[in-house]
Amino acid sequence: MTMKYKDNPQAVADLVRPAEVHRDLYIDDEVFDLEMKHLFASTWVYVGHESQVPNAGDYFATEVAAQPILLARHTDGEVYVLHNRCPHKGTKIVIDRAGNTGKFFRCPYHAWSFRTNGKLLAIPLKKGYKDTGFEQSEAGQSGLPPVGAVKNYRGFIFVRMKQEGISFEDFFGGSLSSLDNMIDRSPVGKLEVAGPPLRYMHNCNWKMLVDNQTDTCHPMVAHESSAGTAVEIWESLEKDENTKTPMAMEVIAPFMSPYEFFEDMGIRTWPNGHGHTGVHHSIHSDYSAIPGYLEMMEEAYGEERAKAILGENRHNTVYFPNIMIKGPIQQLRVFIPLAANKTLVESYIFRLVGAPEMLLERTAMYNRLINAPTSIVGHDDLEMYERAQEGLHCQELEWVNVQRLYEEGEDLDLEAVENGTTERQMRNQFHAWKKFTVESMEAEARDLADA
């Protein structure tokens, strides 16, 4: 197979133009391998939440940059992020997605064992490794190697796989305000993951899912058969002044809002590929009040601060490269790339500690109506992704258009608020994709030249 992009940073850079991107970003296996090696390894990627490993010995396994890793709670109370790979023969230490390993991990192949902070604990017949280096117990040499850099931000754990690179604060900047708002909606400023995620395999490229999170010109079109049908049925029913709108209808009806609603909603973008819809209002703005919740918040934060927190109704916040959060309903979706044409989507919901349980009920309902494999709405998007994944193989058209409301010379390294139907956030994501992928490739080339 001809390698068009490996060792060719300029060819990779040429895939992204100011208002269009090449189809190879979605369909090319070589590009996929490069973005795992460079983009996902040099940016800050979400791993999990500390509430998923509440007790010593708890672990949670996932993957970042196509590498198996795990979170583990050690006896010192700290959460460690380790490569899920025995240093002996390379066997994955755990294959269950989550569990409790007790005081140590034990490799199922040759019984090498490791503390939950990754340090080597024991090797059977250790004398056979005398003077080989495996006598040492330093993690990363004979233990489970730690990942390059870890940041626990208010319970949300991110990693940068490379030892050196952009700092957490510089990478996310002002975009952390969306996470802050979601956490601050708890009267005690604390979230807990509520149950396992909903998992949904998508036969499409991961970037299609990320693009879609701030695509506000599709809901009233793609979801007409689902949300539109639900609205028609609800409107056809006999109702009187005492009829309350069901929670499910409050959740699904806004998907059929007109273009003007989404235009006025606004989109904010931050540097490095982050952005959110719902600057002024969103599809979450008009949910019914939960009895007693405002009073709890006012007692915790004061009236002015409580109203400011609850008055922020951002729709979807994209944290580049591959998660989206919905602050008003405490949801996080992770788009885990498995191949150029395969993505595992995990949708998590969070409990607001100290808040009424009805909030969690609404969150769970939203997740199941919109994001589950058995959902009403999610299948609409999946069909569009799969059609696009197939359509991009068309030989006559090589470029994907992202020029809606594009203006010559736009500066994506600046924060901006624009019309809610702009594709600026998509351009922002591709700008970041190009920046971090190419910079990493160029750095690797320099290192090889200096070696």
Image (tube, rainbow, N blue to C red):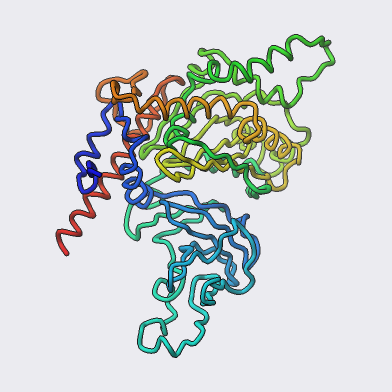
Q: In this view, does 185 lie above or below 408?
A: below
Q: Which of 439 and 95 is in front in this view?
A: 95
Residue plotted at (32% across, 58% down): 164
* Residue furthest front in the image: 1
Which residue is located at x 55 percent, y 29 percent? 315
Image quarter of residue 61:
bottom right
| Residue placed most toward the observer, 330 or 400 | 400
Total tally of numbered discs in the picture: 0
Residue located 52% across and 82% down the image: 122
Percent position (x, y) of residue 301? 65, 42
Give how far across and how far down residue 170 sits, in percent: 37, 47
Is residue 387 at least partly visible in the picture? Answer: yes
Horizontal side, residue 1 vs residue 422: left or right: left
- Horizontal side of 32 relative to 364 (left or right) equals left
Q: Position of residue 79 (x, y in %)?
A: 55, 63
- Quadrant showing the N terminus: top left
Q: Closer to the camera, 365 or 305? A: 365
Residue drawn at (80%, 19%), measured in percent from left and top?
244
Q: In which quarter of the image is the C terminus?
A: bottom left
Q: Give the image location of residue 409, x and y in percent.
A: 25, 25
Vertical relation: 121 (above or below) 21: below
User: Residue 19, can we see it?
Assistant: no
